[in-house]
Image: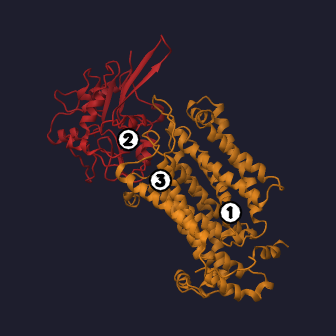
Chain colours: A orange, B red
């Protein structure tokens, strides 16, 4: 019942041929490019003059590391959604699976950029491959992240190959690009499609555990540091997995509502609300893990982790902590749990809160344990500098740029909609495909 | 095997901090620099002086101690280094290969003693012209581990004056605080109260290993299991 309705609802009223300049697109691209250029300029300057950040010898990791952790987490959404489609056979999410996967890949691409913006000697990053020491969790991250990116890219490619072939068969200025990417592949027989689908489904069984490994390893970067109470807890890897899934799904829901129309995403009716419901189930899991951590920390007499969490809850970081509780847990749950408020806009607002709340969580987890010294000394607060924030904004801008360009160059949503159009609309197909073939150019 | 270590007798220490200054001069450690850098805790001290006030007025006790790198037997900084830039050498020293370090600062996060420092800002040319110690020490693979001016964006730390020790070995000079004229680290040589003893912990007859076995002897944050090679002899 919903399915037929969905097909109708998401079809744009008139796929008009766009020959004029796409102003909103242009503005987004230019603004993003300016921010990116500014960040690159600041970074090059830093490499000569020194690091302009709130970091110090004790608080050695700053705002960029917080972002690094956050973006690894944000990549989880796409993978979880795509896996739900194929492993649990939730057909409804199929329409957004490839887009979610694209968001995941963009998030992953941004991760090494944050690293390059943070390393003291980025030009020596090749040493990670030349001299990598396998005991280091950072090397685990390099290995897992690279594998993950390669697998996700393959996964996405096979997921959209049918649409790419459709695009390559249409007239348009970018046909060469689609053909180049397809490497001459043309087969769209039912047998070939079934084979691709089978491959994607099988890869899901690989991608899902790989995602769990990636987020666990990110948690382990901190958890293995036995000298830092607050880091040194076995709860951190599972907490990172759950935080990643929650923030990742929220990001997908947020971007779909914010830009779904813009990129002509064929979102089936009820999908955004369904994502909201998934979040409403997962947010309490996150709250539960944090509650267990706090109970153990505050019940005991060990001053280590206790001092860290006392500083977080009552010290200079208290606003961030209550921000996390409010925006990361309580408010989104209150919005998403009742069916009445779980509307498209409600989910978007709650998702924005969740992404922000989880960012605060990352900030607290990465920074607070560093502030409290092991040897005699005062607690030192950390605050990012303007340069640090501009560097992070530059990387966000790169993400927006990648999203804008990839959806513009590859109107996959458009092609998907035409391929999955319900039978009654079939006669119109040649007309609309011609039109959008040009819009893609 | 040799395992270099220090024993610091806090009963003898007068808290004059000459060891901190001697270390700076010997190892080309940049002058602390602007006040901003000190306030921000970006100043570099291979050997840093810590003070801690116990009790309330008038029953006060000021506890102070110098903190070089502990050269742990089980160094947490080494296992986290993603590029094998920091390592435990054959003589029991924890060293940094300055020309391999990528500046990820994971070791600084992992070190419980805060003994590792990052070159956050470019040092002025003026410092280089002022005639720093020109010594360079390379390890067996040719990587730079000795003092020399460190490049911007890498982590640095105490080497137990590797340039002195290696030269003494080449020139067959006596090594350690026990022998007359023995070559020792700059901090040990400078200490006017003879509070710092340098020597081989693997040699049971050396002064340092005798002090390490003293009943006043303890190590910093021993509960973490890092097993430092720097021993402190308690006051009183």
The residue identified by callout 3 is A138
Marks 3, 2: nearer the viewer: 2
* Callout 2: SS: strand
Q: Please say whether residue B201 is visible from this viewpoint.
A: no
Marks 1, 3: nearer the viewer: 1
Q: Are marks 1 and 3 in contact (CB under 8 Å)?
A: no
How far from the left and from the top, in percent, is residue A72?
56, 57
How far from the left and from the top, in percent, is residue A391?
48, 54
Chain letter of the residue carrying label 3 = A
Chain letter of the residue carrying label 1 = A
The residue identified by callout 1 is A258
**Is residue A304 depicted above or below A24 in this figure?**
above
The residue identified by callout 2 is B117
- The part of the image, by quadrant, that contains residue A434 is bottom right
In this view, the residue in front, A268 or A26, is A26
How far from the left and from the top, in percent, is residue A145?
52, 61
> Is A140 on the left-hand or right-hand side of A1?
left
Task: Name the residue: 26% across, 22% down.
Answer: B194
The image quadrant where one finds the C terminus of chain B is top left
In this view, the residue in front, A260 or B67, is A260
> Is A135 on the left-hand or right-hand side of A89?
left
**Is residue B144 depicted above or below B114 in this figure?**
below
Chain letter of the residue carrying label 2 = B
> Is A175 on the left-hand or right-hand side of B141?
right
């Amino acid at each position: 019942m919903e399915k037929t309705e969905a097909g109708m609802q998401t079809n744009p009223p008139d796929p008009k041929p766009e020959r004029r300049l796409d102003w909103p697109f242009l503005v987004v691209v230019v603004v993003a490019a300016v921010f990116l250029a500014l960040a690159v300029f600041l970074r090059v300057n830093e490499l000569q003059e020194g690091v302009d950040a709130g970091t110090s010898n004790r608080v050695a990791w700053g705002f960029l590391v917080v972002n690094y952790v956050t973006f690894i987490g944000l990549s989880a959404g796409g993978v979880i959604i795509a896996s739900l489609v194929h492993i649990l056979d939730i057909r409804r999410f199929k329409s957004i699976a490839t887009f979610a996967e694209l968001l995941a890949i963009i998030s992953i691409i941004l991760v090494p950029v944050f690293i390059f913006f943070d390393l003291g000697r980025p030009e020596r990053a090749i040493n990670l491959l030349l001299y990598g020491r396998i005991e280091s969790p950072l090397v685990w991250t390099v290995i897992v992240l690279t594998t993950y990116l390669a697998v996700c890219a393959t996964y996405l490619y096979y997921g959209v190959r049918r649409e790419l072939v459709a695009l390559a068969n249409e007239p348009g200025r970018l046909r060469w690009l689609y053909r180049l990417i397809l490497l001459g592949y043309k087969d769209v027989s039912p047998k070939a499609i079934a084979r691709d689908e089978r491959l994607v489904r099988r890869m899901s069984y690989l991608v899902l555990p790989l995602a769990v490994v990636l987020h666990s390893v990110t948690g382990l970067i901190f958890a293995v540091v036995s000298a830092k109470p607050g880091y040194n807890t076995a709860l951190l890897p599972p907490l990172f997995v759950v935080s990643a899934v929650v923030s990742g799904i929220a990001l997908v829901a947020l971007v779909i509502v914010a830009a779904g129309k813009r990129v002509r995403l064929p979102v089936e009716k009820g999908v955004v609300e369904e994502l909201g419901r998934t979040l409403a189930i997962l947010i309490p899991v996150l709250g539960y893990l944090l509650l267990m951590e706090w109970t153990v920390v505050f019940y005991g007499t060990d001053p280590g982790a206790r001092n860290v969490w006392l500083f977080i809850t009552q010290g200079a970081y208290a606003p961030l902590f209550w921000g996390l509780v409010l925006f990361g847990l309580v408010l989104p749950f209150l919005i998403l749990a009742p069916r009445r408020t779980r509307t498209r806009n409600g989910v978007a607002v709650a998702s924005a809160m969740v992404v922000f709340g989880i960012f605060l969580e990352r900030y607290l987890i990465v920074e607070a344990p560093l502030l409290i010294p092991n040897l005699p000394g005062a607690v030192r607060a950390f605050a990012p500098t303007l340069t640090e924030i501009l560097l992070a904004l530059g990387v966000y801008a790169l993400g927006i740029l990648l999203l804008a360009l990839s959806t513009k160059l590859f109107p996959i949503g458009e092609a998907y909609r035409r391929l999955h159009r319900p039978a009654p609309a079939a006669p119109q197909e040649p007309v609309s495909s011609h039109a959008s073939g040009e819009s893609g150019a | 095997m040799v395992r270099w270590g220090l024993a610091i007798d806090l009963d003898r220490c007068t808290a004059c901090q000459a060891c901190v200054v001697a270390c700076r001069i010997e190892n080309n450690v940049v002058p602390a620099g602007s006040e901003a850098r000190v306030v921000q805790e970006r100043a570099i001290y291979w050997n840093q002086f810590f003070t801690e006030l116990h009790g309330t007025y008038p029953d006060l006790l000021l506890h102070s101690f110098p903190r070089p790198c502990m050269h742990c037997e089980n160094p947490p900084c080494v296992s986290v280094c993603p590029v094998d830039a920091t390592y435990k050498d054959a003589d029991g020293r924890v060293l940094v290969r300055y020309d391999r370090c990528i500046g990820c600062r994971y070791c600084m996060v992992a070190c419980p003693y805060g003994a590792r420092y990052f070159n956050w800002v470019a040092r002025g040319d003026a410092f280089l012209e002022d005639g720093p110690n020109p010594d360079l020490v390379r390890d067996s693979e040719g990587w730079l581990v000795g003092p020399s001016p460190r490049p911007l964006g890498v982590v640095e730390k105490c080497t137990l004056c590797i340039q002195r020790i290696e030269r003494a070995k080449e020139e067959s000079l006596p090594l350690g605080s026990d022998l007359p004229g023995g070559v020792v680290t700059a901090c040990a040589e400078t200490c006017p109260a003879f509070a710092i003893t340098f020597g081989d912990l693997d040699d049971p007859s050396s002064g340092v290993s005798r002090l390490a076995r003293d009943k006043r002897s303890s190590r910093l944050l021993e509960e973490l299991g890092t097993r430092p090679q720097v021993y402190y002899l308690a006051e009183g």
